[in-house]
Each structure stands twice: as structure tokens, then as C-alpha cells.
Image (tube, coloured by chain):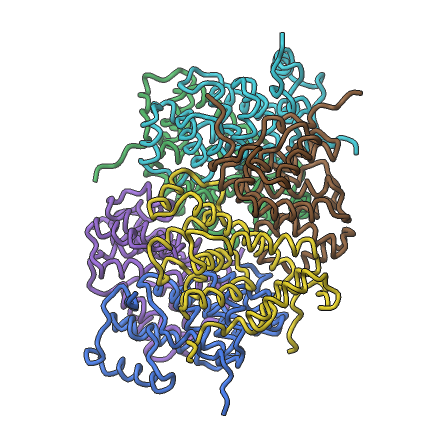
Chain colours: A yellow, B brown, C cyan, D green, E purple, F blue
Amino acid sequence: MAAPPISRYPVPKLEELSEDIRARMLEVQEKAGFVPNVFVTLAHRPAEFRAFFAYHDALMERDSGLSKAEREMIVVATSGANDCHYCIVAHGAILRIYAKNPFVADQVAANYRKADITPRQKAMLAFALKVSLHSSELVDDDYAVVREHGFSDEDIWDIGAIAAFFALSNRMANLISMRPNDEFFVMGRIPRTK
Amino acid sequence: MAAPPISRYPVPKLEELSEDIRARMLEVQEKAGFVPNVFVTLAHRPAEFRAFFAYHDALMERDSGLSKAEREMIVVATSGANDCHYCIVAHGAILRIYAKNPFVADQVAANYRKADITPRQKAMLAFALKVSLHSSELVDDDYAVVREHGFSDEDIWDIGAIAAFFALSNRMANLISMRPNDEFFVMGRIPRTK
Amino acid sequence: MAAPPISRYPVPKLEELSEDIRARMLEVQEKAGFVPNVFVTLAHRPAEFRAFFAYHDALMERDSGLSKAEREMIVVATSGANDCHYCIVAHGAILRIYAKNPFVADQVAANYRKADITPRQKAMLAFALKVSLHSSELVDDDYAVVREHGFSDEDIWDIGAIAAFFALSNRMANLISMRPNDEFFVMGRIPRTK
Amino acid sequence: MAAPPISRYPVPKLEELSEDIRARMLEVQEKAGFVPNVFVTLAHRPAEFRAFFAYHDALMERDSGLSKAEREMIVVATSGANDCHYCIVAHGAILRIYAKNPFVADQVAANYRKADITPRQKAMLAFALKVSLHSSELVDDDYAVVREHGFSDEDIWDIGAIAAFFALSNRMANLISMRPNDEFFVMGRIPRTK
Amino acid sequence: MAAPPISRYPVPKLEELSEDIRARMLEVQEKAGFVPNVFVTLAHRPAEFRAFFAYHDALMERDSGLSKAEREMIVVATSGANDCHYCIVAHGAILRIYAKNPFVADQVAANYRKADITPRQKAMLAFALKVSLHSSELVDDDYAVVREHGFSDEDIWDIGAIAAFFALSNRMANLISMRPNDEFFVMGRIPRTK
Amino acid sequence: MAAPPISRYPVPKLEELSEDIRARMLEVQEKAGFVPNVFVTLAHRPAEFRAFFAYHDALMERDSGLSKAEREMIVVATSGANDCHYCIVAHGAILRIYAKNPFVADQVAANYRKADITPRQKAMLAFALKVSLHSSELVDDDYAVVREHGFSDEDIWDIGAIAAFFALSNRMANLISMRPNDEFFVMGRIPRTK
């Protein structure tokens, strides 16, 4: 079977792209060795592309009480709950690399309660999943529980906002049938040797 | 009872804001007569504020096969499904104004199936709600149904992307307990007389 | 678009009605200035009409530890959970008037947890929603929680019975596609001035 | 273990009852050989008692295109879906007697799809369960399906209204922990011999 | 109406069966007076038959901290939650006999919270239903609750494993539309007199 | 963090095992290079161990119209729906090997609708998931759909019985917190070179 397309929608050629979008793609290619399909497929709508990655970076690159691995845990856990194939696979790879742990992504995608993570991280994911799945039911007690685990109010915004942003991201990926790059499936699974 | 705060988080004072954010607020104030709380409360995080409104405008201001009223219908219907008080009230007001119809917002928030809208609009909302609530279950037939109602592939992206963006927006509003301005509740309910 | 019918079923003309049913309608018209469609549409079945309003009055007019506004809160919250357009709009209007509050109905219809109501009223609505949505899961602890908020056993019957009666009412309104009168949408939204 | 009480609430003694309520109880006792607990327990609130049974009789005793056994099937199927112990057991007994079939009640309470009933009756129960569980999702197609099975519009009102009335009844029984009389469990299970 | 078949699949004749399977059937017939349809219908696949009953006996016949009646309560409660007509009726009969109680099976099938059973048994069924319906959400606290009611770790395995085995059994019965024998419906309902 | 235990329950030492169970483990070790934890952890209960693997082999090793890869697809898809970490990881590995495809397991675990599989296989998985999640709702049409894709009645039993068996298996793994062996995570991800 030929590999299916990476999107239900047309994907622009590199030469058709605006300069800023092309620059962003080349930057990630340099770093990762390939251009993740989320860049290629969302470039079909340049204005949305720019807002999407500005939002992504505002949350995922900022100084935060959450480590980068913890932020990716939130992405993988909520994407698992939303059955978003692209995000589970792509962010699972990133999580394995940040956490230097070949198992944690598959654990968190399936069931964070049984993952090899700290009680603090489990509380973080329970809060994130409530934002993802039942945000109208959030009450003061939910905030109190994560605060007891040492999260500040700004950390809680980060937890909730990452869950909210990937609520968008999961739906976009499902809408356009975004396909993960083959490279993601094995990334971070085998310890690098020098 | 004193009116509760408009956010669980601090809201910046006008003089603390960056120039671009202040300009945006003044612009909307000019147009609406007041600054909707979504601007004030999200300004707590300037980078996210900019991305949020860039995304919003990319979807809600672009040329599209969907009228502005139709886009607001999607917002109201999906916000109703997510029990997001801020978005139902604020976008309900905007929908009443764009549609020049004092009833349609409350109808669509409760149950689009019984609203005074066209079969084409009902198909649009059924698709939007599937994106909002069960996006992993989207299959070719879902796209075929809306295409039969005359929506182009780009229109379908718009429908789905608006549903996806307000999946984010609803969760942010619920996360910070964003409170709608009093002005929204009555906007568009009473026909203006010249 | 012409206004759609107020019911899937025929509605009797005033002169076709039995005397007692006509009297009831005239009484409400005197008080409200119009006849709510629930009277007109249910009159298609006189025996059910009589039982319906007898039940309604037995619960909503009796002396009770619940104020009339609190009883309407239960109606609006459970009708919101059942997506009943007629009941949200009609009883939302009544709630605004009894509570002398133009905001509380839309708040409670969307999410009582964020409404401007007392903790006691939130406990009342949590109990009512459990009766409405998961009545088989009621256990002693649920009764203990509302008792701690000062509700007597008779008050608890009232809370549960109103939730139960509007479980019927919501389903009837959805069954016959009962349409709310235009008048309800704006009632109680604008403070009366003498 | 002593038999638990038949209600969370006090039950009036026969001599405390109003004449009309006592007469009703004696009438059913004559017919059934005992007074079903629904009469005894709801008599705690006489006005509600009267409305409840007036509503019940309006639906269950009227001339209808549905046989009495079919009406009880609706009660048993929806009460099964609502996990209402009283209604499953009491109306299961009545169904066995009306249908002269010792098996059909347990079948319908568990899963009407596998019950020994006609395709027409299965369509009736599918409609009733939609009213009971998802009434806001009713659309024209649902009415068309039952019409194709020969149900008139008035029959459809009966189907839906019985489902709606027992939505109330199930919640009341769960609210007060109404206990079925021992007699119901075996009624109609063993063919009478003359 | 002729009685429908006891399975969607062919059922082997007694003379076609392997010796061990026939022996098993004759043994149960001796004891019960008839061969329950689960034996006859699953014999269509002899290897699966043998594994099924080996598993059944390993759980239901072993020495355990749970009485035989308690084990059947788990079967009836979880089969009720899975709407498995065969298992509710057949194991309901067995539960009535083991518990020497004509009411408990119908109670537990509808709603264990209101059954005439001990608080310890209610905790057991709450755990069993969590295994049956939401096993991925099991956390340490769930085990702690049942331990406080005096269940050992081995008892907890029994509770969970019986719920797990009947998750299989319910699905097989629903898959093949297994029909309960008429005899089960009345078994254990009427006290035997010597 | 030290690796957590592979089960909430004690696991027997190799020398404590009965001969037949030890033989089974050595056989699988020979073939796979390690003993999967499902063997080690379930050996805590030898009688259940024997029945479990007899059932497993009866379904997974028999001659069938389903290929071995297709049977593992059913396992992975239903285990994904049940959030069973052990089964997703372990059977995902087996699926990759049988299908000689490094991507299909992660695809099917997340969302079979978007996997690189045939329409026939998608129909197979839709049926399997209905057995797994809503078996009481199976109706003739469900069987007709898979038959149209060329599955025989015996194939349909296989599909349903595998879904049913892993309903048990998933619950057992979740009950005892069964941990997948590290080896599974990378198995079948990298094409073997001779």
C-alpha cells in the first residue's frame, strides 16, 4: 500500500511559502533532521500557521515551573485521551527525548496513573485531563490539590493552557487527518551511544 | 453580593499594558462601547494574548464561504456543548447582532436541532459539534454530508478550525473563571430603532 | 423565514377548550400578559394538561424551605443539563424576575458552579442535577451534604421532586418541539423603572 | 436482617389519609390483593399523589393505539435504562400479567433488542429510550421510523409521554428509595391454573 | 411466536460432543435438572468451551474469602451493568438459591446501592463494577476501601477476576445472542417446602 | 527511580512453579528471548493461568479466516479503548512483527479509522470495538456489515471472541497493575537486516 497523504488538504511546496514560514521550517529541520508534518500541513493556512506556532512557543518555550518533559507529558496524556494519533506519536517522541526515558510516553498515553512518574506529576496530569475533558466542572478543590503538590498559580495556568492549546491541536490534526512522520515512531527509544 | 472578580488571575491595569495590546483594547472599546473581559483577563499573559487574538482574527475575519453570523453560530453551539458561560454569553450577543435575530443565540446554545436556521446551517453545526466532541471519529462520510450542503473544502476547514479554536477558548475561560461583562446579556435582544 | 409552529402537534383553539383549561389560560395571561406556549401546546391532551399543572403547582406553589427563585434555579439548571430549549428560556425569564437578577438565569443554565449564588444554592443544584442525571447513584452521603447546608428532609424532597418533574417536562417539550414565546427572551433582563 | 423501610420518608397511616386517597388505595388493593408501595409512599405528599396518579391514569388508562402490555413495555425498558429498582420490579409484574408472558419483563428490562417482541415493538422501545435518555437529539427521522411501523402521531405522543412520565417516576422512586412489595417479584411468573 | 433459537450459531447435538464435554453437561443436568444454554451454545467451539469452564471453575469453585452467594452477586451486578440478559437471568437464579433470598438478585441487577446486602458487600460490588466499567481508573485508594471492609488481597483478586471473567462472558453471550433457559426465570423465587 | 514491581501481587519464583507452567514459560522464552510479564504475574494463580492461556491459544492459534496480524489488531484496538497499558505495549510489539509494519500498532491503538489498513480490516475493528464497548447494542445490521466485507460467521465469532477475551485480559492487567517488559517497547520498530 502506498503511504497515504499527510493531510486531507493540499500542502504547499517549499518554494510557495512565505519567507518567515520557510525560515521556521528550516530551523526545525536543522534541529530535528526533518520537518514534522504539523509544519507542512498547517502551512496551507499561513495566518493560522503563524498564530498556532506563536501560541505553541508562548506556552512550551517560556520559563515555567514545569520542566519541558512535564509539559510534553501534558501533551501526550491529553492527546491520548482525545485519540489524536499525530500528537501521541510526535509528542511521544519529544517526551522520550526530554525525559531521557524510552518508556514514559507510551505509559502516559495509555494511563498516567500507572506511569513511572512522581505523585506530583500524576496530580499535574489529573488536573490537565480535567481541563481537557470536563473543564466546566473545575472547582476550587481542583486548584487546591495541585497547589498542595507545590504548583504555583502561574504553573497551574501553564498546565491548563497547555491542555487547552492541545485541545485545539488534537482537533486540527483529526480534522485534516494529519499523519505523523515515520521518524517519530522510533525517536528516543534507543539510548544513544557516543 | 458584590460582583465576583472577572478572573481567578490578576488582571493588568491599562497603564501596565504593552502598546500593541492597549491599542487592541481601545479599538474594541471604540466599536463595542466597552472592553470585553476576554481581552482584559488574557492580557495577564501578553505572548499568549497576541497569539490568541491573531488566531481568532485569522479565522473569524478572513474571507470565507461562511457568513460572520454562521461563524458565531459555531462558537455558540460548541460553547454550549462545553458549558462555557463566558463564550455562550459573549458570543451569543455577537451572534444576535450579526444575525439581526434576538432568538437564535439562545436556540443554538441549547439545541441547534430546533433552532430557526437552515438545514445547511444545521449540517454545519452537526459537523462542528463532532469536531468539538468526538473529533477522532470523523470519517469520510462526515465530510461528504457537509459537501452535499454546498460547503467547499475550505469552508469545511473553517468550520472545523473554529470549533477547534473555541475548544481552546472554552477551556481557557473555564480555567480562569472568566466572567462575561454585564453588557453582553442584553446586547442584540431589543431591535434598535432609528 | 416564517416563524415555525409552536408544537409538532395540533394546538386547540381557545373556543375548543374546556372551561377549566380556558380559565387557567386566562389567569396566566392576566398575570404575564401572554399565554406561555406550554399551556397552549399541552392543551392538546386535556387530561394530561390538568395533571401536569396540578403537579407543577403542587411543587412550585407550596410553602417550602426553598424560595421561589431557588425552585426556578433547579428548573433552569436541570433543563440546561437536558438541553431543553423551551424550559431554559421560559423558566430563565421567571428566574430573572423572582431573583430580581438579570444574569443568574444564563449563568445557571450554563454552569451553576460559576454562578453568582450562595454555596448553599450550589449544594442544592448539585443534588438536583444528580437526581436529574444519575438518580440511581444517590447515596446517604448526598443527603448528608445538603442537610449540612441547612436543608430539611422536606426541602430535600422538594429539590428532588422539582428535578424529577422537570425531567418529565423537558422530555415533553423536546418530544413535541415546544417553542418558547418571543416574550420570554427579554423578560427580566432590563430593570423596570417606575 | 430486618426488612428495610419502604421509603426514606415517613409513610402515613391509613387512618390519616384523605378520603379520596384512601379510596384509591382500597380500590387497588381489591384488584391486586395488596397496596403497591408507590401509593403508600407518595401519600406523604397528598397534592403530589393526586397529580401523579391523575397523570398516570391519563396515559396508562386512555384509549390508545398501544396495548396495555405495550405501554408497560415502555415503562420496564426505560426504568431498566434508569436503573430504577421499584419500577422494574413492579411494572415487570404488571407487564407479565398483561402480556401473559413470564419472560418478557426480564428480557425488556435487560435488553429489548433481544426480547421476544415484534419489530414494531422494538421500534417503539427504541423511540421511547431516545426520549428517556437523549430527548434533545430527537429529529424528524426518529418520528418517520416509528410511523413506518404503523404508529400514528397520537400513538407517538403516547410513547413519548409514557417515557417522560416514568422519567419522573424513576427519579422519585430513586429519591425516596422506594422499595417494591415482595408480592411483585413472583407475580405473573407461574401460569395460573383454574 | 415460536421460541427463538438459543444462539445465532449452530449448537451441536449431544451425540456429536466429545466425551469430556458431554460428561460435563450430564453432570450439570443431574444437579440442576436441565442443561443451561451456556453449555450447549459454547460447545460449538470445544477448545474455547474447555477453557471457559476451566476458568469459571477456577474462580467460582475455589476456596475463597467470598461466599458463593457473594461471588454470584458480583456476576449479577456486573452483568446488569453490561445489559447481558443471559447472565442476569441465569446467575440471578443461582444467586437466589445460594443466598436463599428471592429478592436479592433483582435488587442487585438493578442497583446494588439499594439492595438488602451488607455495607461490606456494597463495597465489594463497587470495586467489582469499577473493574467492569473503568478498570484503567483503579488507584490505591480503591484497594484501601475494600481492605478496610476486611477483604484480603487474595479476596480482592477474586472480586476483580470474577468481574473480569464475566466481562468476557457477557460479551460472548451478547455476541451469540445466548438465550436463557425458561427454567431460570422462576428458580429460587418460591421457598421450597419439604 | 527504581523500576516499580511488575504486579501488585507476589510473583512466584521459577522453582516454585508447576512443571507445566514452567515448561510454558521456557517455551515462550526460547521463542521471544524473554518471558513476558503476563506469564510471570498470572502464575500467582496456577489454575487461572492454565485456563487463561488455554483460552488465549484456542483463539489466537486456531485456523481462522483472520490472519495472525489481524487478530493482534483486534487486541491492540480494544486494549487502546480500555486504556490497558500492558496489552497495548505487548501486543503492539507482536502486531508490528506479524504485520512486518513498524507503524500500524501505534496507529491502531490511537485510532483505527486513520490507520494504514484495508477497509475490510476497519470493518473488522469497528465490530470488535462494538463487542468490547457496547456489546448489548449488537444488532443484525452489525453482522451484515462485516459479512459484506467477506467475513464468514466463524470469522465473526473469532472477531467477537477475541474482543471478549481481551476484555477479560485488559481488566486483569489493570487490576494487578501488570507492567510490560522493557523489551516490548522497541520490538518490531526497526527493520531487521540480515
| Residue found 64% across the figure and 35% down from its top | B25
Q: Position of residue D120 (x, y in %)?
A: 61, 49
Q: Nearer the viewer, residue B141 or A45?
A: A45
Where does the C terminus of chain C fall, quadrant-wise? top right
Q: Position of residue C190 (x, y in %)?
A: 62, 18
Seen in the image, is B165 located left or right of residue A99? right
- The answer to whether one can see residue D61 in this image is no
Seen in the image, is E169 located left or right of residue A81? left
Q: Nearer the viewer, residue D95 or E71?
A: E71
Q: Is residue E61 above or below residue B29?
A: below
Q: Position of residue D4 (x, y in %)?
A: 27, 35
Where does the N terminus of chain C fall, quadrant-wise? top right
Q: Is residue A77 above or below residue F121?
A: above
The residue sitting at the bottom extreme is F194
Res E157 quadrant in image? bottom left
The residue sitting at the top extreme is C194
| Residue found 60% across the figure and 59% down from its top | A174
Count of number-bearing discs:
0
Q: Is residue F163 above or below residue C45?
A: below
| Residue found 50% across the figure and 53% down from its top | A62
Q: Position of residue D96 (x, y in %)?
A: 45, 44
Q: Nearer the viewer, residue B170 or D80?
A: B170
Q: Is residue C90 above or below residue D150?
A: above
| Residue found 65% across the figure and 56% down from its top | A49
Res A118 quadrant in image? bottom left
Q: Nearer the viewer, residue F5 or C90?
A: F5
- The answer to whether one can see residue A76 in this image is yes
